[in-house]
Image (spheres, rainbow, N blue to C red):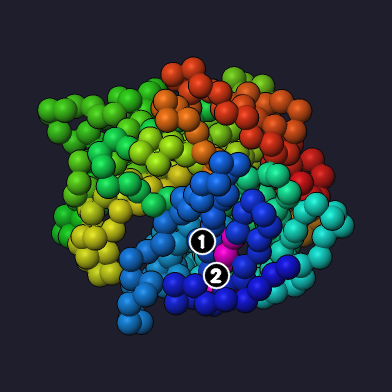
Amino acid sequence: MMKNQVIHSQPSFVLANEQVSVAITKRGGQMAPVTFKSRDGQQISPYYISPWQDEEPANMPAEVLVPLRGDFFCMPFGGNASEYKGEKHPPHGETATGVWSFVDDKTSRPDCSRLTLALDTHIRKGRVTKEISLCEQHPVVYQRHTVHGFVGPTPVGHHATLAMPDDVGTFRISTSPFRLGMTNPGVFSDPACGEYQLLAIGKTFGDLKEIPTLLKDPACIDCSRLPLRRGFSDLFAVVADIEALNGTPAWSAAVNTKEHWVWFSLRDPRNLPTTAFWLENHGRHSFPWNGRNQCLGIEDICGFFADGLAASVNENTLSDQGIATAITCSDATPADIRSIQGAVSVPATFDRVAEICFGDNEITLRSESGQLVTVPLNYKFVLGEGLQP
């Protein structure tokens, strides 16, 4: 059953079963806190909640910052600083800033719970339906966003944001095979605005362990172990290698080697080919960041980095290489974007996810140290099979 509750200053919808409890803010549809209960009883709450949530309300420089937390659906994804054909969208779009309405909490399956919300967009007319599903014995959140109207091209994405541990290198980050890795093509953090970045501008790479920096020493840095040095805010992206995946979902994973759990996300690379990584480690000093913010965005998108609508629908460095940076919405067929995100306990010797194998209603995570962890879930849902998991 769905409940209404104010959580960290934001009125929220709460859906829960024995394995998972998930809160969705009414403003912005932002998903956190989420608690996953492992078989050993461990309570895992991986998602970030911005540090200003329980402070006195203040005028934020962007609406998306008001409830900022966890994962949220963005359309158009990105900063949206430039107009496109007379459209001027807020950062990450109305889906991340508007007020979502309750539709129902009905489901046709006794072993699943579902919450359905809806939001009407006004800058470009459309209606977005958000379905959050939980299934018994599955330590994951199934999400489906259906877009009616909103006719035309747009970048979209899931802005999943995790709470970053304090100790350097605690998070071990990995992804499914990617065909291209690239640092943000422009300045991501401007010192004139009280922001600082470490990574180079517009440089390609083939390994998370060797990403170019602005420095001569080190010229490259290992971004598979986070957080990095304190004081920087950076962005890089990887594009899934669809051929290597051979019909299976693309994935990203973050292992907390101190608390011994892994968070993972699954996506359809045909819809969301790119994952953008936002590394925020006390690198922004303007309000409301104030040099205190620490989080990790692992954002599954179809877009041109975080540059927004105009940059994504026009020719860009990625689209020139045949990489989709926008979807096209039409009246004829609603767009259908799906995501699976989950978290489970892992053995103390489980370090970094080397591989995810897809079985019959389960996945198996293999660490570089050789440990195996099997997770029950319906991964075919993310590939578009069935209306419910």
As rendered, which of 25 and 121 lies closer to the eye? Answer: 25
Element on which disc 2 rests: strand
As rendered, which of 332 and 25 lies closer to the eye? Answer: 25
Residue at 74% in and 60% down = 114
Residue 175: x and y in percent read 49, 30
Residue 70: x and y in percent read 48, 57
- Mark closest to the chain's N terminus, 1 or 2: 2
Badge 2 density bin: few <14, some 14–19, many ≥20, Cα 10 Å: many
Magenta span includes 364: no
Residue 236: x and y in percent read 37, 39
Badge 1 density bin: few <14, some 14–19, many ≥20, Cα 10 Å: many
Residue at 42% in and 30% down = 348
As rendered, which of 151 and 9 lies closer to the eye? Answer: 9
Residue at 32% in and 33% down = 225
Q: Is residue 124 above or below residue 159?
A: below
Q: Quadrant of residue 113?
A: bottom right
Residue at numbered disc 2: 25
Q: Is residue 176 above or below residue 99?
A: above
- Give the magenta-colored segment's residue range: 22-27
Residue at 12% in and 28% down = 217
Q: Is residue 74 above or below residue 372?
A: below
Residue at numbered disc 1: 32
Element on which disc 1 rests: strand
Would residue 303 be found to the left or right of residue 198 on screen? right
Residue at the extreme right of the image, as rendered: 108
Residue at the extreme top of the image, as rendered: 370
**Residue type, mark 2 in image:** Thr
